[in-house]
Every structure is written in structure tokens, then in C-alpha cells.
Amino acid sequence: MTVLTHQLERSLVIEAPRDVVFRYFTDPGRWAAWWGAGSTIDARPGGRVFIRYPNAVEASGDVLDISAPDRIVFTLGYAGNPSIPHGASRVTIALEAVPRGTRLRLRHEFAGADARDQHVQGWRYQLSLFANVVANERHAGAAALADAWFKVWDEADPDARMRALARIASPGVRLHDKFSCVEGLEELSAHIAGAQRFMPGVTMTRRGDTRQCQGTMLADWSASRADGQPLGNGVNVFMLGPDGLIESVTGFWQ
């Protein structure tokens, strides 16, 4: 291969465990979800890498090295592009476990500066897509998580309420709204008991679909009195952790 004297590097944290992130380099279906329909990868040394972008541009190469869940190295070139043909550049992606999930470090090596510069925005965009694809899979059950959050406010039994909260929220979960500024599962459970005492029979239910982007979820809700009369509407902003649990909730009444 041509001597590769120019390189670009990028780094970002993806809020998911390293083994979850690495699947996107070994599973052809997940690879295609990241790059575009028709893309595929044979994740073994010598295996083929193929990318079909949504604009029909095609790129290909070969896997040079792979070590789960640490790194993958592959060549990359473009069909119909004599300046960067098949195998004319090299991509190294390394994954490091960090407290918030996985730090991805990319190095893409080229023979010339022009080719390198043409890829700077491309990788900025492509890795942003990657972070979203991983987050969408990681938080695929986010709507059910929101429903469980609203349901736990109806739970009168303290032990059952604590068990329900522990299944959906982190130990240090925080709640902020016009009536709340609490932190931790025990404080939250006691706060819910207080709400049941002073607002008996009030229930909350989700309205419409949730919206989730890289661990931030919006869920509209409506509150009703015990007799079924509407009390109000609002929206909750949920912050979800790399483990899939709720880390904080900020509620807005409308």
C-alpha cells in the first residue's frame, strides 16, 4: 500500500458500553444501519468492508486487524475515484471504556493532504450518525421506561414503589419540577408518597410518542383527578444513562 503520511483524528464519547458499540463493527446489519442500506462487513482479517452511502457513492476495503472489543483496522477507497482507490487509505477505530460509556478514537491515514481534508467534515457527520444509531438501539425501550415512571406515582406500597423505582432509575436519580427538588431513590419514593397524600387520586399518563436523542427523552403527559377530570398537561425531560436507567427528570407544567 502507498505510504500514508497524512492523517486526521477524531474522538467522542458514546454513552453505551464498549461491547454494545463494538457490535457495529462485527454485525453486518448494524454496520448497514450506521452507513446505509446495502453496506456490509466481514469482520475478520482479510474480510471485505463495503459501504454504500445514501447518495449511491460506494467505498470498499479490507479488514487488516480486529480485536474485540478494543479496535478494528481496515483499508478504505472509493469506486470511480482514482485519487483514493480501493485500499488507498487506512482507518483505525479504537474503543476505551470510560465512566459515561465508551470513548471512540478514530485515525484515518491518507497519502495526501487533499484527501485528508476532504474527509474532515465527513467523519464529523458520520460519527455523529453513529452515536445516534447506537443510542437509538440502547434506548429502544425508552417509551416503556417513561410509562413505568408515570405508573410508579400510583404505587401506594412503599416497598413495591422502591422496587419499581430501582428497576427504572439510577440510585442518585434527580427530579426537578415546580413542586420538586429531590435526589436519590429514597427521597424520591418519599416525595411520591407525599404527592399521594396531598393530591389523592391524581394520575399521570403519557400522551403521544416519546422523542429520544442520544439519551435525552421528551415525554408529554396529562394529569387527571380521581373523578377523571383533567388537572393539567406537561412535558418531562428524561436524561438516560449509559446503563439505560433514568438519571434525572425535569418536568414542565403547561
Image: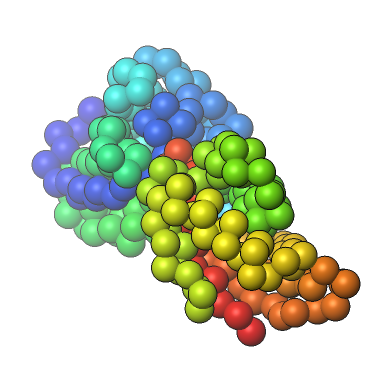
Residue with the most extreme top position: 45
- The answer to whether residue 63 shows anywhere in this view is yes
Compared to residue 10, the image places residue 69 above or below, namely above
Which image quadrant is residue 19 in? top left
Residue with the most extreme left position: 5
Compared to residue 150, the image places residue 34 above or below, namely above
Quadrant of image for the C terminus: bottom right
Residue with the most extreme front position: 197
Compared to residue 161, the image places residue 117 above or below, namely below
What x and y, as percent, mark residue 233? 70, 78
What x and y, as percent, mark residue 3? 15, 34
237 left or right, relative to 9: right
Residue at 11 percent across and 42 percent down: it is 5
Q: Nearer the viewer, residue 167 or 241?
A: 167
Q: Nearer the viewer, residue 123 or 81?
A: 123
Residue with the most extreme bottom position: 254
What x and y, as percent, mark residue 105? 25, 41
Residue at 42 percent across and 68 percent down: it is 181
Residue at 20 percent across and 49 percent down: it is 8
Q: Nearer the viewer, residue 120 or 247?
A: 247
